[in-house]
Image (cartoon, rainbow, N blue to C red):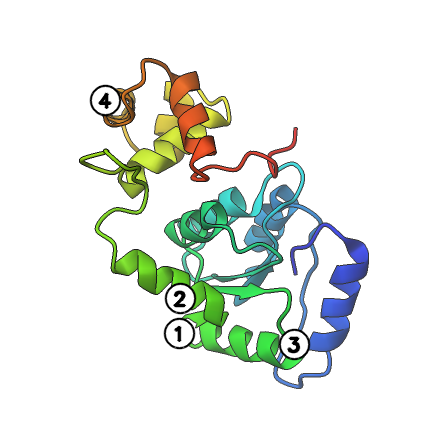
Amino acid sequence: LVEDHKIVREGLRQLMERCPDIQVVGEAADGREAVKMAGEIKPDVVVMDVRMPHLNGIEATRIISNQYPGIKVLILSAYDDDSYVFPLFEAGASGYLLKTASGEELAKAIRSVYGGETALSPHIGAKLVKQLNSRQVYQMENMPEGLTAREMEVLRAAAYGHANKSIAAELGISVQTVQVHLRNIFSKLQVRSRSEAVACAIQNGWITLEEKHE
């Protein structure tokens, strides 16, 4: 269980302990701790919050999914913003449940992702269907070609202040490729700098920096 509010974490544990087939093997209060514990405990499923200190749920999900592909990540969040939902699935999440769900729905979702299925709150499912029916997710009016998922990963990392070398290492690509992505981003958004590109993405709700804490 990864949740920065202790009282919520305790409540989730109590709910899950009622299920004979589910065992809570660890608890983390932030994304950084979640990544560390995932490597040590190797749980079948991580139930992940999104907005947390030190390392947010998006980045923690991406790291866990890349380093430990056998671990399924189920998002449990109070937020259904596009700026959370789409990046989380791009990061490797196997399911997304809103905190309005019942304990029974959470248990069912855990079983589903453990079994290799996708678990979604109805509202989240509707968002994903709409996304699949759209040719471009990150696109504004009068914008001939939208940003790709990879371009958004680069832009999001740039928004967090990462240098090109750091972005390249994080995404497993070359520095030159990062530079190409940035040039394409600037061209598509018709901006001249990183700060203008980031401001544009935030204005359109593609990036949310509130969950990023030092």
Mark toward the start of the polypeptide (3 vs 1):
3
Residue at screen point 36% across, 61% down: 128
Relative placement, left or right, of 116 versus 151 is right
Q: Indicate the amino acid at tag 1.
A: Glu
* Residue underneath mark 3: 102
Alpha carbon of mark 3 to alpha carbon of mark 1: how far? 19 Å
Q: Which circle, 3 or 1, is nearer the viewer?
A: 3
Q: Which residue is mark 2?
A: 126
- N-terminal of the pair, mark 2 or mark 1, is 1
The correct choice, above or below, for 171 with respect to 108 in the image is: above
Q: Amino acid at mark 4?
A: Ser
- Disc 4 marks which residue? 187
Front one among 109 and 25: 109
Q: Nearer the viewer, mark 4 or mark 1?
A: 4
Q: Secondary structure at mark 4?
A: helix
Pick the residue in front: 17 or 144: 144
The N terminus is located in which quarter? bottom right
Local secondary structure at mark 1: loop
Disc 3 element: loop
Q: CA distance from mark 2 to mark 3?
A: 19 Å
At 67% from the left and 83% from the top, the residue drawn is 19
Number of the front mark, 2 or 1: 2
Residue 12 location (% of width, % of height): 72, 68
Out of 128 and 179, give the one closest to the viewer. 128
The answer for how far apart the CA atoms under marks 4 and 1 are is 38 Å
Q: Contact, CB < 8 Å: mark 2 with mark 3?
A: no
Q: Nearer the viewer, residue 20 or 75?
A: 75
Q: Residues within 10 Å of mark 4 (few under 14, many from 20)?
A: few
| Above or below, 44 relative to 144 | below
Look at the numbered disc 2 and give the secondary structure of its residue: helix
